[in-house]
Amino acid sequence: MGKGMQGILRGLIQAGMYLAYRPKVVYKNQQAMEVMNGDAPVVFICNHMSHKDGALIASVLHKKQPYFLIAKDWYEKKQFEGFLRTYGSVPVDRTGMDTSWYDACRKLLEAGHSILIFPEGKTSKGEMNAFQPGFAVLAEKTGAKVVECAHIGSYHLFFGERKRILIGDSYTLECPKDMRKSAYAKQIAGQARERILHMKEILEAMKSGKLKFTGDKADKATPVSEAAATEEPQQ
C-alpha cells in the first residue's frame, strides 16, 4: 500500500474514532499546545485502560501522527493485522525479553516520527500499574521530548459518557553523570506515573464540576471551592 493511500485510510480511521467516542481534549497549558504544533519528534506516554486506547489516543494526537506500541498477539490476529499496519503501530512481545520494539522506535524517532507508549504495559481497570522505564531510556537516548497524557471515562459508541483526555507538559531527559542510566530511567518512570495520576484527578475534578476551565487549557481551570483546588504537578 502506498503512503498516500495509507494516509487517507488513517485519516478515515481517525475521523471514525472521533465520531464514535467524541473525545473531549484539554491541554494543560500553552506549552503543550505548542509542542503538538511543532515538528520535533515526541515520546507520548499515557495511562492504559482498554485495548482501544492506542487507536483513540493516536487519533487525538493526529497532528503528530504517532506510531503506538501494541502487544504482538494482537498483530498476529488476521482480522486486526491490516488495520494495525495501516494505522502505524509497533508490535511488542510481552512474553520474553523483546528489544525489537526499542530498535524500531529509536529508528522512527531518529527519522522524525513520534511514538505513543503505554508504560504500564497492560491495561488497568482500577489503580494504575507501575510504569516500565523503557520510554525514559528511549527518550534519553534519542533526545526526543516526553509528553505526558492522561485519560478517563469509558468507551461508549456515539452516546453516553465521553472520553476525557488531558495533554500535559513536555520535557527532555539527561541522565546525571553520577547516576546509572537504568536507575535514572526507573526514577523518571515513577515520577511520571505520579504526575499522570494527578492529571487523572484534574480530569475527574473537571468532570464532576469541581473545576471549571476556560477554552481548552487546564492551567486556566478555576476551582469551584478552595477545597477542590489541586496543585499543578511538577516536572
Image (cartoon, grey):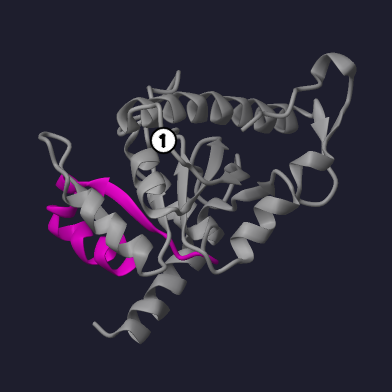
Say whether residue 110 is left or right of residue 128: left
Give the residue at the far front of this rendering: 178
| Image coords of residue 176 (percent x, y) | 45, 33
Q: Quadrant of residue 80?
A: bottom left
Q: Which quadrant, please, contains the C terminus?
A: top right
Residue shown at 74%/47% (left/top)? 29
Q: Nearer the viewer, residue 164 or 235?
A: 235
Residue shown at 31%/30% (left/top)? 182
The image shows residue 84, relative to residue 174, as above or below, that is: below
| Image coords of residue 86 (percent x, y) | 30, 69
Q: Nearer the viewer, residue 192 or 173?
A: 173
Q: Within 10 angstroms of label 1, few (less than 14), some, or many (20 or more) residues?
A: many
Say whether residue 128 is left or right of residue 78: right
The magenta stretch spans residue 12: no
| Image coords of residue 73 (percent x, y) | 15, 45
Residue shown at 60%/39% (left/top)? 161
Provide the secondary structure element on which disc 1 rests: loop
Specify the segment rendered in magenta: 63-89
Q: Quadrant of residue 9?
A: bottom left
In the rendered image, is residue 118 in sight? no
Q: The disc labelled 1 sits on which kind of residue?
A: His
Q: Nearer the viewer, residue 162 or 223?
A: 223
Q: Quadrant of residue 85?
A: bottom left
Residue that mark 1 sits on: 48
| Image coords of residue 217 (percent x, y) | 76, 47
Give the residue at the far top of this rendering: 227
